[in-house]
Amino acid sequence: MANILPPGLPSLLSGTTYDFELYKAARILVEELLKLKSGEVFVITADTESDLKVVSATAAAAFAVGAKPMVIITPSPLGVGKAADPMLPIKALAAALKEADAWVEFNNQWLLYSTPWEIAMKENKKLRYLCLVGMHADMMVRCIGRVNFPVLREFMEKFVELHKNTKHMKVTTPAGTNVEFDLHPGRPFICHTRADTPGSHMLPGQISFAPIYESINGIIVFDGSIYPPLGLVKTPVKLHIKEGRVVKIEGGADAAQFEAWLKSFNDPNMFMLAHMSYGLNPGARLTGNIVEDERVWGCTEWGLGYVNPYLTPDIGGRKAASHTDGICLNSSVWLDDVQLLDKGKVVHPELKELAKKLGKE
């Protein structure tokens, strides 16, 4: 029998997933989050570990609204951030990014905090950068295509507002996290809900801030994932924190590997805490992909190493050889004496109804 299916349809039916939903998510990405305009230059970066279906759908969506997409694919570096520099075409990549109106990063080995990223963010003041590292079709559909962004924005803005007059915070988890710290009145809360203004933006569903580093004391237990170098952890990794620095690491094989990786840089700043973040994307799941893991509803996440200048304008950031993030699941959080989260569930009365609208009771 002759093949009477339209060209392209056989491949569509051969096992690929989310072909229709992915394009809808890509349209939301370029139209609602980035607000791309006709004629704008839109750079999409990826590496040889990236999901090219996501890359293609996003480029098509950008072209459909009249933007000028340009896709740059490089070999996957053997590290992230500054550790990626030796394998990157730094000057050529930076030159392209300096002329872009918007940039979305789909690299699996991320360029965030690398030298090309630093050059682009410093010299291109109009650039709208959106970090979607490691994005794949399933994640893009769940975390972008099926999210009610107007409600999420309202929820997250109110969430940040509740921190406004807070001086002291406490975070605990069932896995053993018990850490306290003070907030710095001059440091911002970075609320990731959109990417339509110049600057650095992340996948919506995360709020990040930098406490007063020397006030951070206690125990932080990563029981979700750590990346780099691990991904999903098999056994919890326990960090002893004194005045914002990791002074001891305990646990099994994962803890030993993590400590060895930190020491491998021969950089004391890799043992310094960089930021805390909340995970608040209603579609996120714990998968081992850090960009999704750190948005799992009700988690808290701690970064170590490099500090983004946007988080600490008073000190202009902090240099480090690289950066890593670890996930603490089912977090309980207190703002002074008022409880905000209880084992990952929203308990503050001003937030509960909005959480319900997002499907999170």
Image: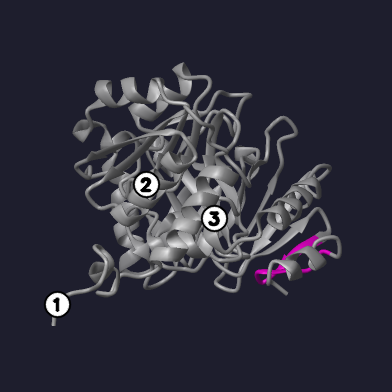
Quadrant of the drawing holding the C terminus: bottom right
For badge 3, the amino acid type reads Glu
- What residue is shown at x 29% (from left), y 59% (from top)? 257
Magenta stretch: give its range: 339-348
For badge 2, the amino acid type reads Phe
In three-dimensional space, the C-alpha distance between marks 1 and 2, rounded to whole angstroms, equals 40 Å
In three-dimensional space, the C-alpha distance between marks 3 and 2, rounded to whole angstroms, equals 21 Å
Position above or below: 112 against 17: above
| Left or right of 150 on screen, residue 296 | left
- What residue is shown at x 55% (from left), y 72% (from top)? 175
The image quadrant of residue 354 is bottom right
Single out the mark in the foreground, 1 or 2: 1
**Mark 2 highlights which residue?**
106
Could you say where residue 142 lies in the image, as x and y percent from the top left? 51, 65
Front residue (pair 211, 124): 124
| Left or right of 318 on screen, residue 344 | right
Front residue (pair 156, 314): 156
**Number of other residues with Cα within 10 Å of mark 3, as a class: few under 14, some 14 to 19, many 20 or more:** many
